[in-house]
């Protein structure tokens, strides 16, 4: 397995370089996992991507580097400490450093001579391909999808020149993943929504959720989806609710700040029983926080957001594959139970690209909007039923009138202040939880039966935890195991209780300062963690860091 | 008046409220236009006027305070076969929902917006609204309202609305005409309906409005924007009612690449082939 860092200032074309490289490496057969670490600025500063590729499964990033592609000097200064003894640094000759492992290349000069100073990144692409023993197969194809037609030729020439300018450094490893997908969590969410029959997406741009908005917009016209950029997140969620009420499957997406504005309308979805899917792509808070970085600190917020009580479901996304299938499932659950379903993603999983087997939309059946009404007796939108689920008709599609209200209402949907009706309506809505609990998916268990230490995590720490368990169990007779939650609210408890009962030590690993999952687990089950590894610096923990902190006993 | 299709219900309004006349006229306008109640969607936020959808036989979306517009435009986007009417108050439309008011003018979705403008907050018992006049003393504005009243008509014209009208609950035939014109207009149409609040507005009474309003006559050119702005600013001893400004503009449905194809959004299906092609594009 190789781990390559590509760094430079914003505006130097890191994204394009990485996008071309990861595609070619995947085509060449590798498993690929790329994370993006960038500042909230359009030019300057220090940005980097970590491109990890190999023939074995890759679940997350690693801190140890086999190579650094430095588009500026700062990249070398900041990251050379992570370079393995046999690693290389590829940099522009302008950086003027010399050491045995430094490969100095006149990338900027070569680009200028090709008549386009902006193709220096493509020179780096060519050089990297050669350094890792790759061929130039498929380069034109990969460029075509990323570079504008008028710049195709200069970029292709730049790749060729970079390729010829260096020697092979590491051997090519034969992998079998060329027919798999390479996709980010956010794009997988967009694909899942489209596959689920999304018809309307409203959102206000906010990092890191904008990637979903753009990915849906890119396919909207062809798919027959209306995408509306709302004036604010309040409008976005009220639009989504309006569309869903009227029978067009709808979704909205945002990050924590926008979710804060959506809170009242979340309750409208709950009270009026209108299906709604909302995704919160988390970033560090409070308020503006660290706009382009990652955190898992909205869990307790989203499970209790909005006044009053109503059933809801919260699903945390663990990887790109989860992002696709769970988004589809969210639409199904929202429709079946007429509730808001909240997907929790974060910048790490949202922006990271990973190799995954091609998605199969047939794996998830999504209920159609509205439901059969037998036509007997008066139509009652909020009829009391054994399941708590009332017949949902779409307005305008029958002779029946469909009335919804944010006020407490009777079975017809009309305002009431009756104490009897109020109690029955709350009971009706909450009754739906019994059905929802039947649908819960247990957390993923990682490890084997004889474990002593149980790690608990949720969402995007899935990858790092999976890698940490493998590292920790090397020569330790499988002492370590983990449970990583996807469905997180209502909290699935069966497997948790079973595994926690066998564990000598329980440690929660979370990207927040207060251990929100541990708190939720304790509240719901009485199970307490013996210690936690909490990280809230905006950077995703790696498997190596988890393993290291557990071995050193750095557990609070 | 024949209101069999749109029924009559008990209301929770104060006797003498302007809402009664507006509700009557709304039912009459819908009846005269031959609308089928099951194809009409009334949307509102919160307030005394926002109770209107509860008192008329039609589909009803009674959502959040100030948020009727975003929900209503999305309902129309989802199903263009519905006649979508936002029927709510000045606080809901211009206060809590002010941002949506501005931006939905830009969208120009084919919906109708009737604002019951009594220049006071009724449901919360008598505080100043965005259109309350200077000097109005309330339980909150104890020294008299000193914030400039909003001019919704001027704002709507300036923001690019294609149908901007004013009416008065006391001129019922005229109000019915305004409602019919607004409902049949292709695009976002707003009618600001002046109405007395008998309980909380002791300044802008029925008599106060009745003395001042005058109907714009046939000689008035409603397509002249500069003139329309002038008339919109006339709010004192004389208040013009009628269509202040009218312009034919491309609607949201005509501008949107998906909706312009004429298939109601809720009837569309995503083809499995399309999804599979999309998935393959990531291989």
Image: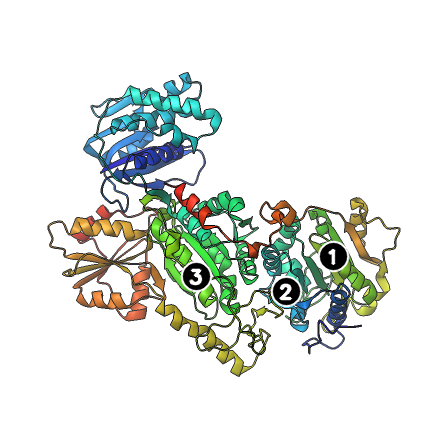
Q: Residues within 10 Å of mark 2 (few under 14, many from 20)?
A: many
Quadrant that contains the C terminus of chain A: bottom left
Locate residue A386, reporting x and y percent.
Answer: 44, 78
Say above or below: B44 vs A37. Answer: below
Q: Are marks 1 and 3 in contact (CB under 8 Å)?
A: no
Q: Quadrant of residue B68?
A: bottom right
The mark closer to the camera, 3 or 2, is: 3
Report the residue marked by disc 2.
Answer: B44
Going from N to C along the chain, the mark reached first, 1 or 2, is 2
Alpha-carbon distance for marks 1 and 2?
A: 20 Å
Residue A56 is situated, as x and y percent measured from the top left of the image, at: 22, 43
Q: Could you tell me which residue is drawn at 60 percent across and 54 percent down?
A: B264
Indicate whether A426 appears above or below A341: below
Chain letter, disc 1 residue: B
Quadrant where the N terminus of chain A is found in the figure: top left
What is the quadrant of residue A89 in the picture?
top left
**Secondary structure of the residue carrying numbered label 1:** helix
Residue A213 position, x and y percent, is: 48, 47
- Percent across and percent down for residue B119 are 72, 64
Contact, mark 1 vs mark 2 (Cβ under 8 Å): no
Residue toward you, A231 or A159: A159
Residue occupying the far front of the picture: B273
- SS at mark 3 in the image: helix
* Residue denoted by label 1: B184
Residue A189 relative to residue B207: left or right? left
Check chain identity for marks 3 and 2: say if they share one: no
* Residue under pointer 3: A332
Total number of numbered discs in the rendering? 3
**Farthest residue in the bottom direction?**
A420
Provide the chain ID for the residue under circle 2. Answer: B
The reply to whether callout 3 and callout 2 are in contact (CB within 8 Å) is no
What is the distance, in whole Å, between disc 3 and disc 2 at their CAs?
Answer: 28 Å
């Amino acid at each position: 397995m190789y781990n390559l860092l590509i760094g430079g200032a914003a505006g130097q074309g890191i994204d394009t370089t990485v996008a071309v490289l990861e595609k070619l490496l995947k085509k060449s057969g590798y498993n690929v996992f790329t994370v993006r670490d960038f500042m909230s600025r359009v030019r300057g500063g220090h940005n980097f991507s970590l491109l990890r590729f190999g023939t074995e499964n890759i679940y997350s990033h690693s801190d140890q580097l086999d190579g650094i592609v430095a588009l500026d000097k700062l990249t070398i200064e900041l990251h050379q400490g992570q370079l393995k003894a046999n690693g290389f640094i590829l940099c522009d000759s302008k950086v003027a450093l010399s050491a045995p492992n430094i490969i100095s290349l006149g990338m900027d000069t070569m680009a200028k001579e090709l008549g386009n100073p902006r193709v220096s990144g493509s020179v780096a692409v060519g050089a990297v391909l050669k350094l890792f023993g790759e061929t130039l197969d498929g380069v034109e194809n990969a460029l075509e999808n990323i570079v504008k037609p008028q710049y195709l030729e200069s970029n292709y020439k730049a790749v060729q020149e970079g390729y010829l300018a260096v020697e092979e450094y590491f051997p090519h490893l034969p992998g079998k993943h060329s027919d798999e997908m390479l996709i980010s969590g956010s794009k997988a969410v967009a694909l899942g929504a489209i596959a689920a029959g999304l018809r309307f997406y409203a959102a206000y741009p906010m990092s890191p959720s904008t990637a979903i908005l753009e990915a849906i917009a890119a396919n909207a016209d062809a798919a027959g989806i209306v995408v509306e950029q709302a004036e604010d997140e309040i409008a976005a969620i009220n639009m989504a609710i309006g569309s869903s009420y009227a029978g067009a499957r709808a979704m909205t997406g945002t990050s924590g700040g926008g979710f804060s504005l959506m809170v009242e309308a979340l309750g409208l979805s709950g009270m009026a029983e209108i299906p709604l899917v909302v995704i919160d792509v988390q970033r560090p808070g409070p308020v503006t926080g660290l706009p382009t970085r990652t955190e898992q600190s909205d869990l307790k917020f989203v499970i209790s957001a909005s006044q009053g009580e109503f059933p809801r479901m919260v699903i945390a996304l663990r990887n790109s594959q989860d992002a696709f299938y769970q988004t589809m499932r969210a639409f199904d659950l929202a429709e079946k139970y007429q509730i808001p379903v909240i997907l929790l993603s974060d910048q790490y999983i949202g922006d990271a690209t990973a190799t995954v087997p091609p998605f199969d939309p047939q794996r998830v059946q999504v209920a159609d909007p509205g439901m059969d009404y037998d036509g007997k007796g008066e139509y009652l939108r909020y009829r009391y039923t054994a399941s708590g689920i009332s017949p949902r008709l779409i307005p305008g599609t029958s002779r029946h009138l469909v009335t919804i209200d944010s006020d407490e209402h009777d079975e017809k949907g009309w305002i009431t202040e009756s104490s009897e009706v109020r109690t029955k309506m709350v009971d009706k809505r909450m009754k739906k939880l019994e059905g929802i609990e039947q649908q819960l998916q247990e957390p993923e268990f990682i490890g084997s039966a004889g474990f002593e230490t149980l790690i608990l995590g949720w969402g995007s720490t899935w990858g790092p935890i999976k890698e940490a368990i493998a590292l920790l169990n090397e020569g330790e007779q499988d002492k370590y195991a983990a449970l990583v939650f996807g469905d997180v609210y209502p909290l699935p408890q069966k497997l948790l209780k079973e595994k926690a009962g066998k564990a000598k030590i329980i440690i929660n690993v979370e990207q927040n300062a207060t251990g929100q999952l541990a708190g939720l687990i304790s509240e719901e089950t009485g199970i307490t963690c013996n210690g936690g590894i909490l990280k809230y610096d905006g950077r995703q923990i790696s498997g190596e860091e988890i393993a290291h902190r557990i071995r050193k006993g750095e557990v609070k | 008046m024949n209101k069999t299709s749109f029924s009559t219900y008990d209301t929770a309004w104060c006797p003498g409220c302007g809402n009664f006349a507006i509700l009557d006229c709304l039912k009459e306008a819908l009846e005269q236009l031959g609308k089928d109640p099951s194809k009409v969607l009334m949307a509102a936020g919160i307030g005394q006027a926002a109770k209107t959808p509860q008192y008329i036989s039609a589909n009803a979306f009674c959502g959040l305070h100030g948020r009727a517009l975003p929900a209503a435009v999305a309902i129309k986007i989802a199903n263009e076969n519905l006649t979508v009417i936002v029927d709510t108050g000045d606080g809901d439309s211009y206060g809590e929902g002010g941002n949506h008011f501005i931006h939905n003018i830009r969208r120009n979705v084919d919906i109708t917006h009737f604002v019951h403008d009594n220049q006071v907050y009724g449901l919360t018992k008598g505080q100043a609204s965005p259109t309350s006049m200077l000097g109005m003393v309330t339980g909150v504005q104890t020294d008299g309202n000193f914030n400039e009243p909003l001019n919704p008509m001027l704002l709507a014209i300036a923001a690019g609305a294609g149908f901007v009208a004013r009416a008065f609950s006391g001129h019922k035939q005229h109000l019915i005409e305004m409602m019919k014109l607004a409902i049949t207009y292709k695009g976002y149409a707003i009618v600001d309906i002046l109405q007395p609040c008998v309980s909380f507005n002791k300044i802008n009474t029925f008599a106060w409005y009745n003395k001042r309003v005058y109907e714009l006559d046939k000689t008035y050119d409603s397509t002249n924007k500069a003139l329309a702005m002038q008339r919109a600013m006339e709010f004192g001893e004389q208040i013009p009612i009628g269509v202040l400004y009218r312009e034919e503009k491309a609607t949201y449905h005509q501008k949107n690449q998906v909706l312009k194809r004429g298939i109601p959004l809720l009837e569309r299906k995503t083809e499995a082939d399309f999804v599979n092609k999309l998935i393959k594009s990531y291989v």
